[in-house]
């Protein structure tokens, strides 16, 4: 049924729970895991006028790259320990939900398994829900793990 399962990760607890579900499904279906983390290269507008914007951007980019690589490394370690085939990628795209959905199609993934932080109310309005946006945009089935 599934030969490739896409697992977006941000290194969070919910991503770790999604990893467990994705690994279980990959084992059952003898599927490959496609592990991704998304780094938004331009998350905010800054002015390179000596006011510290360039330094803030560089600091963000370093931290975001490190977090993405750490989340991927955790998922890779789990897949390796379970004996599952996997590939992994850091996606550098604006808009994580769109990047996840586009990567699902381009990689030939038949299922997206991802965690949800369960944001509600103003947190959901202000921070947005990547999982909710993926559910809206995805052309393949999505399994959301809480």
Image (cartoon, grey):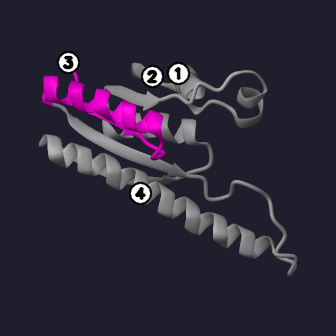
On the image, the x and y values in percent for residue 24 come to: 22, 27
Can you tell which of label 4 and label 3 is closer to the viewer? 4
Q: Which mark is residue 1?
A: 3
Relative vertical location of residue 126 with respect to residue 45 in this rendering, above or below:
above
Can you tell which of label 3 and label 2 is closer to the viewer? 2
**Quadrant assignment, res 130:** top right
Q: Earlier in the sequence, mark 1 or mark 4?
A: 4
Q: Which mark is residue 88?
A: none
Q: Earlier in the sequence, mark 3 or mark 2?
A: 3
Q: Earlier in the sequence, mark 4 or mark 3?
A: 3
Q: CA distance from mark 4 to mark 3?
A: 30 Å
Residue at the image point whose x is 20% and y is 18% from the top: 1
Q: Earlier in the sequence, mark 2 or mark 1?
A: 1
Instruction: Report helix, strand or loop for mark 4.
Output: helix
**Residue position for label 2:** 144
Can you tell which of label 4 and label 2 is closer to the viewer? 4
**Residue position for label 4:** 70
Q: Find the magenta span and give its range.
A: 1-30
**Residue position for label 1:** 135
Instruction: Report helix, strand or loop for mark 3.
Output: loop
On the image, the x and y values in percent for residue 141 come to: 39, 19
């Amino acid at each position: 049924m599934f030969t490739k399962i896409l697992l977006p990760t941000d290194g969070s607890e919910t991503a770790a729970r999604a990893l467990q579900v994705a690994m279980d499904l990959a084992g059952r279906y003898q599927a490959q895991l496609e592990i991704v983390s998304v780094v938004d290269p331009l998350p905010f507008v800054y002015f390179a006028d000596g006011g510290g914007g360039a330094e803030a951007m560089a600091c963000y980019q370093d931290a975001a790259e490190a977090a993405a690589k750490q989340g991927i490394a955790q998922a890779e370690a789990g897949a390796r320990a379970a004996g599952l085939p996997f590939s992994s990628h850091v996606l550098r795209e604006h808009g994580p939900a769109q990047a996840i959905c586009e990567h699902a199609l381009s990689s030939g993934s038949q299922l997206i398994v991802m965690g949800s932080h369960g944001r509600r109310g103003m947190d959901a309005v202000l921070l947005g829900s990547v999982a909710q946006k993926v559910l809206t945009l995805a052309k393949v089935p999505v399994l959301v793990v809480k």
